[in-house]
Amino acid sequence: MRIDIITIFPEMFEGPFSESIIKRAQQKQLVEINLYQLRDFTNDKHKKVDDYAFSGGAGMVMMIEPIVKCIESLTSERIYDDIIYMCPDGELLDQKMANTYSLKHNLIILCGHYKGIDERIREHFITKEISIGNYVLSGGELAAAVFADSIIRLIPRVLGDETSALSDSFQNNMVSPPVYTRPRDFRGWQVPDILLSGNEKLIEDWKYEQSLKRTLERKPELLDDKDI
């Protein structure tokens, strides 16, 4: 998979993309992540990529020309599955979407800033708009990092145990059951006996019941009537 990210703050990705699972995925050459500084595509001598909005109002708007030049430069070299804009009013990211995008090959992610991007970019270039929640961030960089992490970890051979992702919350429209590790007894707080029984069927039944209970309590919207 190749992910090309357009941003005015590429340094913000150094931490998320240089540690842990994403770092290993790049080292294994399972994913290639490229950061493109939008200011490199402006003709302004001060490297300006924003301007006042027509009709006035507070806040600046990211200009159309630098973004179009960057996108067209990338699309002239390869075909992309989607050109994604991270924005508060986009489709809400969920596990189903992450599963779908983990199968893609080439993606462009555009990180907005200020009051957003010139609407003509959304109308003529963006093919998918994604939000990570109903709130506003200072820019799209953190959202892009979250989205990238959610799909990269699902690529085969990225995780050490490939079955691990299959048991994550939301994969079966339920949240994960409680998990425990050693010691068995800590301050009198015990690990449930069933998990130490060695009976795989009983353990799986317990996990399902706990997962269903937790989903009903915390995320009931995930369940259809048929699941209850």
Image (cartoon, grey):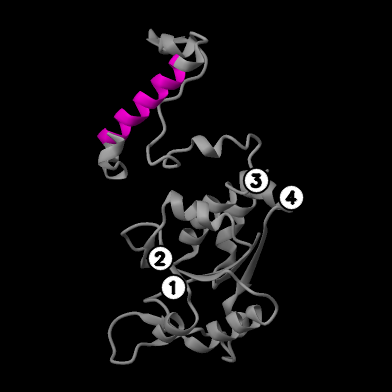
In the rendered image, which quarter contains the N terminus? bottom right
Q: Which residue is mark 1?
A: 113
Q: CA distance from mark 1 to mark 2?
A: 7 Å
Front in this rendered view, residue 75 or 5: 75
The kind of secondary structure element at disc 3 is loop
Q: Earlier in the sequence, mark 2 or mark 3?
A: 2
Q: CA distance from mark 3 to mark 1?
A: 33 Å
Q: Nearer the viewer, mark 2 or mark 3?
A: 3
Under circle 4, the secondary element is helix
Residue 156 vertical position relative to residue 31 in the rendered view, above or below = above
Helix, strand or loop for disc 1 = loop
Q: How many marks?
A: 4
> Which residue appears at 28% of the width and 38% of the height?
226
Q: Nearer the viewer, mark 3 or mark 1?
A: 3
Residue indicated by mark 4: 27
Is 28 displayed left or right of 199 in the figure? Answer: right
Is there CB contact under 8 Å for labels 2 and 4?
A: no
Relative to the observer, which residue lies in front, 52 or 119?
119
Using the rendered view, name the quadrant where residue 57 is placed: bottom left
Q: Which residues are magenta?
A: 202-217
Q: Is residue 209 magenta?
A: yes
> Which element type, helix, strand or loop, lies under badge 2?
loop
Q: Label 3 belongs to which residue? A: 156
Q: Are marks 1 and 2 in contact (CB under 8 Å)?
A: yes
Q: Amino acid at mark 2?
A: Ser
Q: Which residue is mark 2?
A: 138
